[in-house]
Image (tube, rainbow, N blue to C red):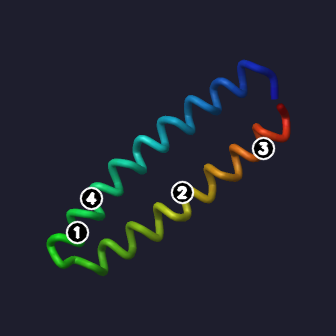
Amino acid sequence: MNKQEIYQEIQKILHEINDISKSLSSSREFISEDSNKKAQVRLAEIESDLQTIAGRIAKINSVL
């Protein structure tokens, strides 16, 4: 990865983290509405997304 690719990947990751933050808000709403099943599903998806991001960050870190 060159510097430009790293920068672009970081920008994508930041955008995805922002989306995940919004998803956490919806999960809180599900919980407050006693829709725990919906919240569980969404939180599992968020966990998977965060694991994917962690892998991408590890790749960037190994290049640096």
**Residue 28: horizontal and vertical position, in percent?**
26, 63
Does the residue at mark 3 contact the one at mark 2 (Cβ under 8 Å)?
A: no
Q: Name the residue type under label 2.
A: Asp
Q: Residue at (72%, 25%) from the top-left corner?
A: 5
Q: Earlier in the sequence, mark 3 or mark 4?
A: 4
Q: On the image, numbered disc 1 is attached to which residue?
A: 30
**Residue 9: horizontal and vertical position, in percent?**
64, 32
Outermost residue toward the top in this view: 4
Question: Hey, which quadrant is residue 36 in on the image?
Answer: bottom left
Q: On the image, numbered disc 2 is attached to which residue?
A: 49
SS label for mark 1:
helix
Q: What number is the disc on residue 59?
A: 3
Q: Residue at (32%, 72%) from the top-left corner?
A: 39
Does the residue at mark 1 contact the one at mark 4 (Cβ under 8 Å)?
A: yes
Q: Residue at (69%, 43%) from the top-left corner?
A: 57
Does the residue at mark 3 contact the one at mark 4 (Cβ under 8 Å)?
A: no
